[in-house]
């Protein structure tokens, strides 16, 4: 299905808002299923979905464990003597946190189903100032650069004979702090070069800018946006009423 | 005739207190002239190009002294985007200057900044694509091209801006011989329509039609003279100050 980037943005915002509102695993799971179905509809390859989620796995596991331990309640499932370790409430909170992150990440992936050119066009046609539209588009584009830079630095450290997996946790954080600067520096250098290159071609010469192409919202776009917005508002309203 | 570029007592250091990469350079290039800058690697050609295009101002640690004017305007007093309308530059490293997702978008970027109506943007894009013969690359991603193709696209993107002065840093170096011939012909055509061109080039055979040669050595301009005069100066040529294939040239002349 071919939809306008603005339609996809509205969808992503609707899905993430619901994810932030919902706090039970069953609803969040349904939401995740809907998001993934949507991604597949936009020809997003399931392997790529997995690829995006994979780096967050250890973080999610960590959050799951922390949340399970620190939000006790309900039936005790596992205890060490008098201290409850795993409770039903804890498990459900842990699962909710993880699912929420997954929904937000997956809906953010909707942004990768269109080009940054279309993204900019969409925003500009919605009267967003063009400097701002470019800034957002570039920030999104730089996320993979950050990731690659991270991989480069980690590889460089490993080439020096340090195996990250074997470094104890305490030392690891100290090391990551040292790695942080080359990564940020590398990304800033790239951003700077990009700024030079863009200005060398007259970017921001005038307060206005024109475009070779234009995007047009079609009926499918209006229908989808209407559907998503009304469904989201209804669900949100229902949630508030119940509470 | 009016001077397109004037340079007065130009010096440059990449950091305060560091070595002088440019050591007091003076020259003038009149409008419409085609100048080829040459000299051994590391002598400061790229640095001079960055100064001329104003791009060096982005290097905050660098120290530039002296004056540069382009079309009578002091380069220091122009905004970066305003400078771009006066002088276009193709960098030696093409990777740092391509940022769009398709070649066509890359070329359209400059005329879009000029606020041209879409039909006029389309015209410019098409004419530059035709001029450089890169229609086959139109939908390609600039990142996935070869070094020579990237230079072609960067050149196309700058030509779409249509600046009166062009600074080209080794754009021919990564092309095969057919590509070199093609781009040299394009440069000749641009020269013909009155553009001022300063092109860095090692391989003098492909740009022997240049009006003047500028020879750099270790941060200084050691010779700036008519091409045929320098090429005929056997003592100078034999001193090994330029990379240049005598045999091919002697065969031609
Ligand atoms: N960003 C930089 N920082 C510090 N020194 C540099 C930088 N770029 C170039 N140089 C130095 O300046 C000198 C001239 O370099 P460059 O202008 O690239 O020469 P050319 O283009 O003639 O090969 C070289 O000694 C080089 O090492
Ligand atoms: Mg150079």
Image: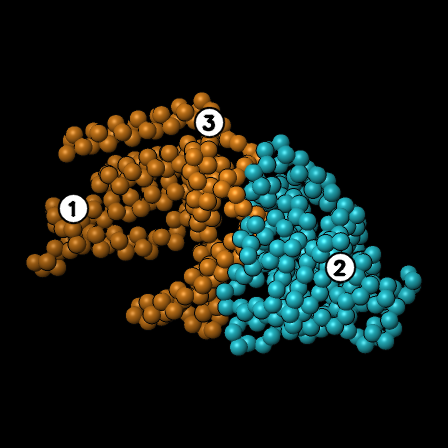
Which chain is disc 3 placed on?
A
Q: Distance between the residues labelled 3 and 1?
A: 45 Å
Indicate the chain coloured cyan by its letter: B
Q: Nearer the viewer, residue A66 or A208?
A: A208
Label 1: chain letter: A
Q: Mark 2 lies on which chain?
A: B
Looking at the rendered image, the disc whose residue lies closer to the viewer, 3 or 2, is: 2
The residue under label 2 is B35
Residue B178 visible in this rendered orientation of the protein: no
Numbered circle sitting on residue B122: none
Image quarter of residue A17: top left
Nearer to us of marks 1 and 2 is: 2
- The figure's colour scheme reads by chain
Identify the chain drawn in orange: A
Point out which mark residue A89 bears: 1
CA–CA distance in space, label 1 to label 2: 77 Å
């Amino acid at each position: 299905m071919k939809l306008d980037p603005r339609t996809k943005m509205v969808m992503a915002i609707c899905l993430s808002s619901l994810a932030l509102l919902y706090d039970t695993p069953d609803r969040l799971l349904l939401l995740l299923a809907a998001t993934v179905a949507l991604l597949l509809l936009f020809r997003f390859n399931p392997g790529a979905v997995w690829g995006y989620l994979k780096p967050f796995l250890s973080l999610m596991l960590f959050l799951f464990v922390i949340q399970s331990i620190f939000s006790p309640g309900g039936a005790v499932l596992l205890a060490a003597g008098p201290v409850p370790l795993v409770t039903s409430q804890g498990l459900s909170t842990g699962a909710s946190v993880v699912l929420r992150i997954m929904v937000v990440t997956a809906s953010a992936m909707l942004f990768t189903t269109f080009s940054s050119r279309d993204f900019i066009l969409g925003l500009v046609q919605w009267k967003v100032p063009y400097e701002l539209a470019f800034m957002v588009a570039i920030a999104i584009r730089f996320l993979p650069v950050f990731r690659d830079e991270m991989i480069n630095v980690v590889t460089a450290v490993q080439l020096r004979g340090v195996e990250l997996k074997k470094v104890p946790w305490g030392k690891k954080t100290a090391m990551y702090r040292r790695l942080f600067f080359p990564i940020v520096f590398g990304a800033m250098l790239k951003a700077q070069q990009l700024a030079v290159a863009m200005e060398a071609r007259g970017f921001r010469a005038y307060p206005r800018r024109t475009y070779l192409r234009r995007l047009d919202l079609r009926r499918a776009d209006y229908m989808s946006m209407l559907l998503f917005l009304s469904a989201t508002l209804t669900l949100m309203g229902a949630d508030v009423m119940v509470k | 005739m009016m001077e397109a570029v004037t340079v007065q007592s130009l010096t440059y250091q990449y950091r305060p207190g560091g070595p002088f990469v440019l050591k007091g350079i003076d020259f003038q290039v009149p409008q419409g002239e085609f100048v080829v800058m040459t000299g051994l690697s590391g002598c400061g050609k790229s640095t001079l190009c960055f100064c001329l295009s104003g791009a060096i101002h982005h290097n905050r640690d660098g120290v530039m002294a002296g004056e540069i004017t382009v079309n009578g305007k002091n380069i220091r007093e122009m905004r970066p985007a305003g400078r771009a309308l006066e002088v276009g530059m193709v960098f030696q490293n093409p990777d740092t200057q391509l940022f769009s997702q398709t070649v066509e978008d890359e070329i359209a970027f400059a005329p879009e900044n000029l606020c041209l109506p879409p039909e006029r943007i389309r015209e410019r894009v098409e004419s530059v694509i035709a001029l450089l013969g890169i229609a086959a690359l139109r939908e390609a991603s600039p990142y996935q091209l070869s070094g020579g193709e990237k230079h072609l696209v960067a050149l196309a993107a700058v030509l779409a801006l249509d600046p009166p002065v062009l600074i080209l840093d080794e754009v021919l170096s990564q092309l095969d011989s057919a590509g070199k011939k093609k781009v040299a012909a394009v440069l000749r055509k641009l020269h013909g329509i009155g553009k001022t061109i300063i092109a860095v080039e090692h391989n003098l055979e492909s740009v022997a039609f240049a009006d003047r040669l500028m020879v750099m050595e270790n941060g200084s301009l050691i010779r700036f003279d008519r091409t045929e005069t320098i090429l005929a100066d056997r003592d100078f040529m034999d001193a090994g100050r330029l990379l240049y294939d005598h045999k091919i040239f002697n065969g031609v002349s």
